Structure formats: C-alpha cells, structure tokens
Image: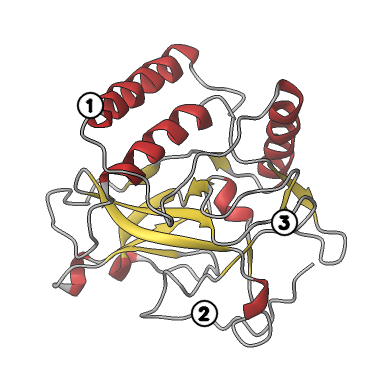
Amino acid sequence: MGYYDINKVFEQIDNYEKLASSISQGCLKMKSTSLKLPTELNSNEIKRLHDSVIMSFNDRNLKFSDDLIYSENINKNIKYTSKELNTYDKLIYYKAKQRMLLCNYAPIEIVKNSNQGGYVVKATNDIDIYTLICEYSGKVDYRANIKIDNDSLMGLANNENDEYNLDIIPNEVSNIARFISGINNISMKHMQNVRSIQCTIDGSPHIILYSDKKIKKGYTLYYNYNEGNKYNPYNTSYFNGD
C-alpha cells in the first residue's frame, strides 16, 4: 500500500475479476448469513484510510500485505480439515479483494489509542452486519516451527497430522487485521463485533474477518483472538479495551 508496482496491482485486479466471473453464473443465492461487500468508499475516505495505514505500519516497522506469505518449507499440496467457502461467499471474497487492492475496504481507519498508546481500528461510518472486513494476513509457517511469543498469532489450518498445522505470524508482515483489538475473554465478550471464518478457497486455507453485528460509526472493532487459536489459547486477562 503506497509502494505497489501498479502493473502488478492491475494484474491482480484482473485475476480476481476472472475468478469472480468464472463462478458468477452458477453462484448460489444469497442467504441471510452470507457475506456482504462493504459500501464503496469515496476518494476522501480512501485517502483517510490509506494515510492511517501508512502512519501505523511505519510506526510499527511493519510491511503491508493483504495476502498470506508462505515459508519456503511449506508443502502446499497438504489437505486441511477446513471446509471450502461456499460459492456465494467466494464471489464476495473475490470482489472484495479487487477493491482492497485500491485501498477500498469497509469504512474503517487505524487510529492511535490515547488510553494505551497502541492502535485500534475504528468505524468511520456504519458497517452492516456480515460485512467482509478483510482477511488475516502475514507469514505462514508450521505451528511446530514457531518460536516467537506473539498475542496476534492466528491458527490458519489444521491437518490430521499435527506436524502440518499452520499458523499466521503477523509480526513482520501483516494487514489491517493486525490492529483489530482483542477482547478479554472474561469481561469483554459483549464487546466482540468481528468474527472469523476459517475456510479453504480453491483448496488453500484462509481466515476471513467479518462484522457479526452492525458496527456504528466511531465504534472500535473487537475480535476474539482465541477464536482461531483453540489449541493453545492466549491469556487475555490484560486486554482492557479503549
């Protein structure tokens, strides 16, 4: 974001357009719980989000990527237990990915949390229920290889053979999801407004984040980081909110 090779960006946009077109004819009908595309941002809203990403990522010395970056040792032919995303939601995912390449997400921005000194993600306009926010990105490695202690690690995929279980590590490369606040699993359950779908898309594992209730303008986005980390849950007792 901000330093993309523009030719590669348009190549990726074309690729997602082809993927969306390839399934749109036979697409399943929308269900009451289907994912939704966010309302498109205007140019001022895009600039506001873009500037907030640049500020927060530079401050944390992070590289931005909306895609998963696999370690070279990963065997991508391994089958995982996650279910394939249904056809309609996959169509929404492809369309959302097209927009995200141009910094057109849900109406959000990353802002400094004055109470704690970190960053939070806030809604800059109302976000409807089941709106696709983003996917969880970062480097991917086998769970058994990960030695760092990071409260933003995300369980990506499980296999019948534990040595092939995968986690996402967002400490060097990540996206907006890295800044979504975590809830305290004891005292903040009522504040959660973002949930995840652990799935495969065309056979590859992904974690998709979406709003599970209407999020009003000015509200902070909250996620339960133990939703994708059931096998080694974090101690969230120190999560306080903003």
Which quadrant holds residue 211?
A: bottom right
How crowded pointer 1 is (Cα within 10 Å; few <14, some 14-19, many 20+) is rated as: few
Q: Nearer the viewer, mark 1 or mark 2?
A: 1
> How many numbered marks appear?
3
Q: Residue furthest bottom?
A: 186
Left or right, residue 217 beside residue 134 = right
Rate crowding at label 3 as few (under 14), some (14 to 19) or many (20 or more) other CA atoms within 10 Å: many
Relative placement, left or right, of 139 versus 131 is left
Q: Residue shown at 43%/15% (left/top)?
A: 10
Whether residue 4 is situated above or below residue 157 in the rendered picture: above
Residue sitting at x 40%, y 80% = 232
Q: Which residue is mark 1?
A: 22
State which tag comes first along the sequence, 1 or 2. Answer: 1
Label 3 vs label 1: CA separation?
37 Å
Gap in Å between the C-alphas at discs 3 and 2?
A: 19 Å
Q: Quadrant of residue 53?
A: top right
**Upstream in the sequence, badge 3 or badge 1?**
1
Q: Which residue is mark 3?
A: 120
State whether residue 117 is above or below residue 28: below
Residue 181 pos. (x, y %)? 65, 63
Separation of disc 1 and disc 2 at Cα? 40 Å
| Residue lying furthest top | 7
| Circle number at residue 60 | none
Q: Which residue is mark 2?
A: 234
The amino acid pointed to by label 3 is Val
**Closest to the observer: 116 or 131?**
131
Mark 3 or mark 2, which has the lower sequence index?
Answer: 3
